[in-house]
Image (tube, helix red, strand yellow):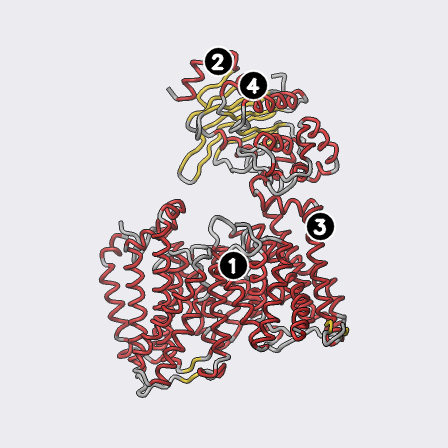
Amino acid sequence: MEDLLQPMLNGLLLGGLYAVIAIGMTTMFGIVKLVNLAHGDLMILGSYLSLVLVSWLGFNPFWTLLAVVPVMFFVGFFVQGFLLNRVLGKEMEPPLLVAFGLSIILQNLLLLIFTPDARSLMTDLSIKTIPLGGSVNLPVLYFVDFLIGCAVILVLHLFFKNTYIGRAIRAASDDEIGARLMGINTKNIYAYAMGIAMMTAAVAGVLVGMTFTFYPHTGPQYLIIAFGVMIIGGLGSMKGCLVGGIILAEAQLIGAQFAGPGYQLLIGYLVLLIVLGVRPQGIFGKV
Amino acid sequence: MNKTLKYRWHILGLIFVTLSTVPIWGSDYVLFFCLLFFLYASMAQMWNLLVGYSGLLSLGQQAFVGFGGYTMAVLTNYYGVYVWLSVLIGGLFSVLLALFMSLFIFRMKGIFFGIGTWVFAEILLLWFSNWKYVKYGTGLFVKPATPPSMSTIYYAALIMGVGTLITVFVILRSKIGLGLMAMRDDEEVSEAMGVEIFRSKLFCFLVAALITGTTAGVLYVFQIFIQPYKAFAIDWTIVLVFIVVIGGIGTIEGPIVGAFIYVLLSQWLAEYGHVSLLILGIIAITIMLVAPKGIMGTLQEKTGFTILPSRRT
Amino acid sequence: MSESLALKVRDLDIFYKDFQALWNVSLEVREGKIVSVIGANGSGKSTLLNTISGLLDPTRGTIELFGERIDGLPPHETVPRGVTLVPEGRRIFPRLTVYENLVMGSYTPRRRSKREETISKAYELFPVLNERHDQMADTLSGGEQQMLAIARAMMSEPKLILCDEISLGLAPVIIKDIYKRLGQINQEGITIVLVEQDVKRSLKAASQAYVMLEGKIVLEGQPSSLTEEQVKNAYFGI
């Protein structure tokens, strides 16, 4: 039991990071019923943007958020406005395939510019721990990830609840034609929504970059994590996102404690498959 | 147009005779080109059968590519099974894998089905790259007791290419195909015949696994070397998406045209490495935006031209 | 003509692919009046309203709102010009509160500043919505949802309001109440176009009526001058 305390704590904290990885994709799914297959790659794009600022200007990765988050807003706005909106219609394959194409382009573009080498946004935070008594230590970076993850979800929640654009996004996802009749330009609103989703992906990208190493090809791995969080937490639900993130991360870390660290990813995938097989609508989703 | 229809079988026959004599008259380059063309066309036909006709958005075809390929390699290397027999067994093993997968993923719809298949492929990748029996991530060299000649491999590929085409043609013109197309055109029909549609979809999924696994076996007999990071990579599905989208999703001719363009482009772009995938991605997105029905779909819409009508008239 | 025209539709044709839904439809609505468009299911009434509001593009023909051409403009351009549709099936936002639904009605930038003022006006008109203020819209009864749909449309401060089948599926006593409110709205000088299957009620409320059949206008006139026989024949196409 003593041995399990540390992985359980780490899993809880990592869950916060998983939630912020997934929140943008979950939000977009709730609005346009579209799984953005390029979500992971766009997030990694955020990591690389931060890397550029860190290595050129010597900024602390945290400060790069000030630049990366707005840039990613525009990236999202244009991806939705100029690519995905054009193929949004009755059939679901075209937007999926466009997003998939975007994913291929991003991965290979990053590969071309940054080479396949592993990168990271390491700071001195990554090795700091606070002893909590017994053999349990609080990894400071994971804790920061968790706090920022929760903060992002809270801010997003307030945004959707209290602003014109946030409400319009919810209105458009409730009834698209109804929203248009109120004078809401829904295509424009979708572009804003994607911009906002990419702001969260930017935060996730910087945090992931600070916590783990990343390569041009790591995007899909995080897409699958985001997907797992979304499935476990229930489709399009924000609170479910945090819970889903924690469950997935706990399963991975506790599983790895028993089976060995090499199996962390595998266990995550298995949990995802089991949830998909048993409850395709997610644990917290409506039946 | 009537003229082309009248001589349709003559033209097809001529093409077939030309292709089946390539080892006699063709250069090595032509031989390689046609061989790859058949194999990609075959796998793309299967992806098209799933996505374009059955509404099963599979993003995990690489599961069957890798599983079929590895089964072939293991049987040939470790058990000395005759190489073409192990290719066939590889296909059958892929069917078993597909059956097992269907227990989980057939409850999912749309993109969830897609991610489900993808996750399966990722699991297989992790499993094979951590499995001592298949030499972890280092991979296996396929070493048959008597290595088949290049023209034998060519004919195997030709059989896969033509056989797949005939299979798809027969399926689509059968009751199953008619049901699937009725579903594609009108969702209410599909709800009225739910169970039947479920069986038809499962049937197509298994056929796709069989043919994709077998085709992959032939491909790896040709390539000699199999490795989990390549065999189970999402890149396979990327290529299939590219081929089918360019050629025209939901048409029989589409995957053929798309495979031809893909093999041509990939030969041209081969020396540019990753830029080639980048360019393929840009081409695919442009096609989706400009002509979402692909080359053959757009052609059919404009002129009503089909070589192999999938609908009985 | 002394009174100005709120809406002038001329020679409107609409196609859905190969199917023609509207044939040469012309209609005039004078400012401050209630005009009724009646017809059986599928006669093209909703298509007409959807085209005026900008959800559909006319294939041929023109639409003028207070003398300004609006045909082909999307809803987010027609709404600021003063025309709002209360759509068939209400299309309220089920997972937004009553208050938030109303806020969405004042989405267009110029309306936002006067939001609280118009909301209190809406609550005055439909006091029941004030009581439901913080409830999710999908918890309202059918009649309340219809009131919300009308109140939400009023939030955009329209000069012309188009109502599509607002009495569908509601109890007579509620329909009567809603029509009373429509009368109040009209008294404030807002022009109303009513599309109904409920012939009697809408004819009673209107000062001008059009009867549609299979995408064409087959009869028009003042309700008082039309006989029941005429209307019935036009409605059923006898």
The answer to whether B247 is drawn above or below residue C107 in the figure is below
**Residue where numbered disc 3 is placed:** A158
Q: Which residue is drawn at 75% across and 67% down?
A: A62
Lower sequence index among marks 3 and 1 = 1
**Residue where numbered disc 2 is placed:** C226
Q: Which residue is drawn at 50% across and 18% down?
A: C200
Mark 1–mark 2 Cα distance, whole angstroms, equals: 57 Å
The mark lying in front, picked from 4 and 3, is 3
**Residue where numbered disc 4 is placed:** C206
Mark 2–mark 3 Cα distance, whole angstroms, equals: 56 Å
Tell which subunit mark 1 falls on: A
Of residues A275 and C103, the one drawn nearer to the viewer in this rendering: A275
Callout 2 amino acid: Leu
Mark 2 Cα shell of 10 Å, populated few (<14), some (14-19), many (≥20): some
Q: Residue B273 carries which label?
A: none
**Residue where numbered disc 1 is placed:** A98
Mark 2–mark 4 Cα distance, whole angstroms, equals: 12 Å
Tell which subunit mark 3 falls on: A
Mark 4–mark 1 Cα distance, whole angstroms, equals: 51 Å
